[in-house]
Image: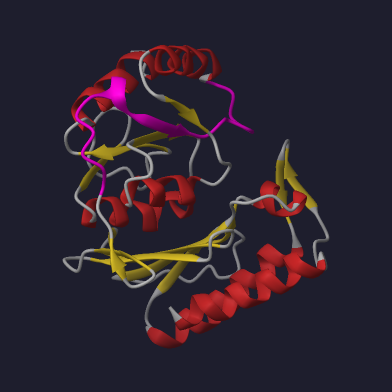
Amino acid sequence: MEVVKTAAAYVQKCHDERKDLNIEVKGEHNFVTEVDKKTEEILVEGLGALIPEAGFIAEEGTSDKRGAIHNWIIDPVDGTTNFIHGVHPFAISVGLTEHNEVVAGIIYEFGLNEYFYAWKGGGAWRNGSPIRVSNVPEIRHALIATGFPYTNFTFLSEFMESMDFFMHHSHGLRRLGSAATDIAYVACGRYDAFYEYGLNPWDIAAGILLVKEAGGMVSDFRGNPDPLFKENVVCANRLCFSEFQQTVQKIMVRE
């Protein structure tokens, strides 16, 4: 928490003053700023001191060290495009894995000044209070979040079909531009379900644990319960998870 707070203070200062942006293009519609890089450096240094033998899987590649047992998975600014334009939400996301299982995680969302955090067996929390997923039993009563593809358009037609379905058969779709925030909102019951493809481990590592510890379920599109490195994710409360996952799989997965 203290390491993330230090990093967050730097990001907030840069956001308020609109400095150190120095926008670079990693790919079509895929941006990185000097803030992303410096924030990751702060996190790598601070987290490295906590568990010296741990390695890192970090979006901006600040460290290529890999740990035999423990690895930190870091997204210094999830929602960089939002950050560039001065739009919330954007977040810091940090997960700790033990033999590739996420055992601790924290997501800090700047817009509402909210720290979401969890550790294996310890429940899920927001700013000191416990959180739980919603109890909506069916997709037709659910508010669903997703993320639009911005570099990988391989499954765009399937994705458009899925949006069409959920627009007609749920309370609606939302797209905030920060997968980490979306998943944290599932964990605290604001959203009932979330799905997205084209993701990286740092987008979802902390969120996976948050949802599980908040009483929800997580998988990839095919129902594999370990989606960390699968590049897509489905998460929801336990009551509607099966219906939601099967619907996403039916539309998004073409055999």
- Residue at position x 37%, y 83% in the image: 51
**Is residue 32 found left or right of 88 in the rendered image?**
right
Please determine whether, in this image, residue 83 is positioned above or below residue 242.
below
User: Which of these two is toward me, 146 or 70?
Assistant: 146
Quadrant that contains the N terminus: bottom left
At which x and y percent is residue 240?
21, 30
Please determine whether, in this image, residue 107 is positioned above or below residue 217.
below
User: Which of these two is toward me, 20 or 194?
Assistant: 194
- Judged by its main secondary structure, the magenta piece is loop
**Is residue 108 found left or right of 149 in the rendered image?**
left
Q: Is residue 2 magenta?
A: no
- Count every numbered label the image shows and give the total: 0
At which x and y percent is residue 120?
21, 65
Query: Which colour scheme appears in the figure?
Result: secondary structure
Q: Residues in magenta?
A: 133-154
At which x and y percent is residue 196?
45, 33
Residue 14 visible in image: yes
- Residue at position x 37%, y 40% in the image: 191
Please determine whether, in this image, residue 223 is positioned above or below residue 24.
above
**Is residue 164 found left or right of 16 in the rendered image?**
left
Quadrant that contains the C terminus: top left
Q: Is residue 143 magenta?
A: yes
Residue 97 visible in image: no
At which x and y percent is residue 253?
36, 18
- Residue at position x 34%, y 35% in the image: 193
- Say which quarter of the image contains residue 59: bottom right
- Residue at position x 73%, y 36% in the image: 28
- Say which quarter of the image contains residue 135: top left
User: Which of these two is toward me, 67 or 87?
Assistant: 87
- Say which quarter of the image contains residue 128: bottom left
